[in-house]
Image (spheres, rainbow, N blue to C red):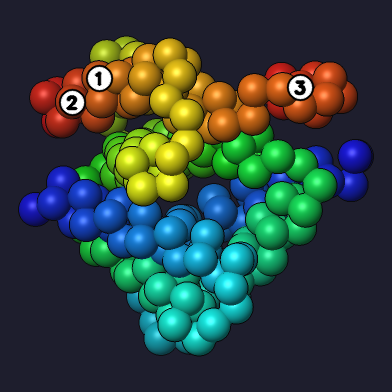
């Protein structure tokens, strides 16, 4: 349950980041809602996950999935570069998350 | 430049405050403080990003957050910690830092130096 909440929190964070990107380009109410709503939801879900997971584990997994997600969204939808450093970094995060999941 | 890094420090610090708040809040008015802390944290974050590359700021933020929450777990909330956990967290944070810094491959040397300070 805790891991599921952290995953949802990270997805909300990605929505917030996409909203931030839209909002910084075009200041509309809709974009502001995606930005603030995404981050707001993310905090609520992260808070809920603390009931099930150790604080530092929930935090680091949230940061990791959120970062990977944001980078993948940028690569897939916004045509950002996918260089070797980025691929290796993503693999490192996946190893970290999988390892933490395996031992806890 | 110096001032920008003070904002990075403040945003990292306030982040730890609200995470701590999440764990100890038990009255409705605590949440007023926590939401204010989050708002203040985002204000410092946007200030820090005005002159520094966002990737560098976020990487620092993630690193400080991870170390801070780990210390909180151990010393305040009596969580268990072991070397294997530490190693996986370290690998994960390296990935986060790598991703964020690869967003800005060539910035001026002053910023690069600052990123490692």
Q: Nearer the viewer, mark 2 or mark 3?
A: 3
Residue at 43% x, 14% y is A84
Q: Are marks 1 and 2 in contact (CB under 8 Å)?
A: yes
Q: Residues within 10 Å of mark 1 (few under 14, many from 20)?
A: some
Mark 1 or 3, closer to the camera = 3
Q: Residues at marks 1 and 2, common chain?
A: yes
Q: Residues within 10 Å of mark 2 (few under 14, many from 20)?
A: some
In screen coordinates, is A9 left or right of B90? left
Kindly identify which residue carries mark 2: A98
Residue B20 visible (yes or no) = yes
Chain letter of the residue beneath label 2 in the structure image: A
- Asked which quadrant contains residue A74, the reply is top left
Q: Chain of mark 3?
A: B
Q: Position of residue A66 (x, y in %)?
A: 36, 45
In the picture shown, does residue B113 fall above or below A41? above
**Point 39% across, 38% down: residue:** A75
SS of the residue under disc 2: helix
Labelled pair 1, 3 in contact (Cβ < 8 Å): no
């Amino acid at each position: 349950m805790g891991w599921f909440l952290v995953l949802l929190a990270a997805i909300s964070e990605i929505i917030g980041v996409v909203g931030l990107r839209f909002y910084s380009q075009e200041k509309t109410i809709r974009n502001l809602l995606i930005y603030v709503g995404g981050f707001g939801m993310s905090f609520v879900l992260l808070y809920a996950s603390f009931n099930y997971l150790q604080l530092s584990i929930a935090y680091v997994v949230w940061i990791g999935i959120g970062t990977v997600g944001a980078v993948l969204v940028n690569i897939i939808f916004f045509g950002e570069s996918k260089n070797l450093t980025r691929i290796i970094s993503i693999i490192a995060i996946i190893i970290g998350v999988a390892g933490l999941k395996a031992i806890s | 430049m110096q001032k920008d890094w003070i904002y990075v420090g403040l945003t990292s610090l306030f982040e730890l405050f609200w995470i701590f708040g999440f764990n100890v809040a038990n009255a409705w008015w605590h949440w007023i403080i926590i939401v204010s802390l989050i708002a203040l944290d985002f204000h410092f974050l946007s200030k820090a990003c005005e002159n520094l590359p966002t990737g560098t700021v976020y990487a620092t933020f993630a690193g400080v957050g991870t170390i801070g929450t780990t210390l909180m777990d151990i010393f305040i909330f009596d969580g268990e910690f072991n070397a294997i956990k530490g190693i996986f967290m370290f690998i994960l944070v390296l990935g986060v830092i790598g991703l964020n810094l690869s967003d800005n491959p060539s910035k001026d040397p002053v910023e690069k130096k600052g990123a490692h300070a």
